[in-house]
Amino acid sequence: MAASDNKNSLLNYVTVYVMLPLGVVNENNELSDPETLEAQLKRLKQEAGIDGVMVDVWWGIIESDGPKQYNWTAYKKLFQLIARLELKIQAIMSFHKCGGNVGDVVTIPIPKWVRDVGDSNPDIFYTNRKGTRNDEYLSIGVDNVALFDGRTAVQLYSDFMNSFKENMSDLIQSGDIVDIEVGLGPAGELRYPSYPQSQGWEFPGIGEFQCYDKYLTRDFKEAAAKADHPEWDFPEDAGEYNDKPEDTGFFKKNGTYVSEEGKFFLTWYSNKLIFHGDKILGEANKIFNGLKLNLAAKVSGIHWLYNHHSHAAELTAGYYNLSERDGYRPIARMVSKHYGILNFTCLEMKDTDNADEALSAPEELVQDVLSKAWKEGIDAAGENALETYEAKGYNQILLNARPNGVNPNGKPKLKMYGFTYLRLSDTLFEDDKFELFKKFVKKMHADHDYCGDAGQYGQEIVPLEMQNSQLTEEDIADAAQPSGDFQWDSETDMKVDG
């Protein structure tokens, strides 16, 4: 029986969204080429049957004129255009700079009046051991420090989201805006900017720890003193961006990372990141509480060096993930406190996509992260990391979307909440590529046509509940205990070329 023959099989339907171009609203706060955009979105809706679009809502554009001077005009026009086409909207609260990362084709800095604070106080930015600053995103060290026209960084983000809610309330109430993905770091991801191409990082380098601003330095020294080890300090032997793990004292076999001092540092470094996410998601939860929409947070797919015993690239990014310590379930537990969705990336990647020296394992990493979300009782969504136009990538996404295949009689054992395709471009509409994309959407929909009633596939959006409890260090330590992963089939039962 084909999946589409059985109404119960609609419960296998996985939504497909398409990410809009980074500069769809340009740095002058103008909607770029709305005629071409509308024509492309019509094709995606009518011919491919996509469910909606995802779009970056840039802090650096909206609040560029000055503190609390929000200008939503262009985004309002954009969202109204999308809603007219009966496409749903996933809005990213993009508190980071666009430019300097993989795929960044435009440059949109954070607001100038915020950067101006950094002219006299550069410690508002993430800083590596050499003292190099990174202006992609404000350091989590200033989350609670009132440096920005009397406001803390957390208040900046909270006020922005409040203004979004007020100005887009009609589109939220009408059900056109369905998801709010809360930006929590560089590239919108909950991580440190440990592998910046703008500072010379190249794949598959280990990256560098980014905690040397005065605020995080002070916090660490206070934590070390409280632990009766005032002599402990940041690592001196963790190498530089493009080093290999074995060439460093910190990440080599039996290196500093397994010492008591190393473990203390890594716990502090990763916990700071998780509690940062908790604070910002907590603000979002308070703002959007009671509204029919989802909250989401994105985690970065750091697949390189995953097969090295130190997981060095994950550690520098803030993911304290080792064979004997789970780095992702604590994040999932934090997200669960806010009834959020965990969004992940690199869903299209195979282990064989990169050279052996990269020690890359995206397939195992995806299984790891999605499993931990599901074990914490929350939904998982995802994206491709790089441009994807071929059957191999689509089939891998389909496998991850339903790791044990379609259940023709009802909900599958494992199913992702949704997938966002990166990204809308002229290339996607080239004949063969678009035909294959249409097949991909159909297979994600379990061979069903587009379905506009989310309740039919078990994903009716309910009012957002209030945060259920406070996250504690004990929560994180408990979630960090190894718990294993779910099993994946070897290949999808819904191949686009099958």
Image (tube, grey):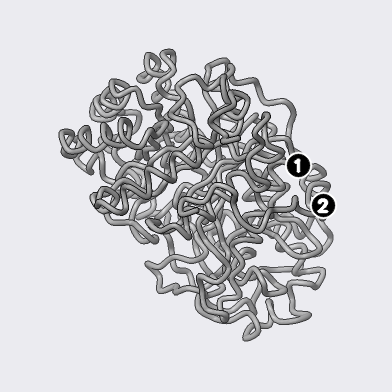
In the picture, residue 48 is in which quadrant? top left
Q: Position of residue 372 (x, y in %)?
A: 72, 47
Residue at figure coordinates x 38%, y 18% from the top left: 171
Residue at figure coordinates x 28%, y 24% from the top left: 76
Q: Position of residue 185 (x, y in %)?
A: 50, 49
Q: Is residue 346 above or below residue 82?
A: below
Q: Amino acid at mark 1?
A: Lys
Left or right, 421 with respect to 344, comes to: left
Q: Position of residue 447 (x, y in %)?
A: 50, 36
Q: Position of residue 168 (x, y in %)?
A: 37, 20
Near-viewer residue (202 or 241): 202
Q: Residues within 10 Å of mark 2 (few under 14, many from 20)?
A: some
Residue at figure coordinates x 43%, y 28% from the top left: 450
Residue labelled with disc 1: 375
Near-viewer residue (400 or 372): 400
Q: Is residue 388 above or below residue 405?
A: below
Residue contact between numbered discs 2 and 1, judged by CB atoms under 8 Å: yes
Near-viewer residue (127 or 174): 174
Residue labelled with disc 2: 483
Judge whether residue 140 can be spotted in this image.
no
Q: For the view shown, which residue lies furthest in the front direction?
A: 1
In the picture, residue 105 is in which quadrant? bottom left
Label 2: element kind: loop
Q: Is residue 152 above or below residue 118?
A: above
Label 2 to label 1, Cα distance in Å?
9 Å
Left or right, 312 with respect to 97, comes to: right
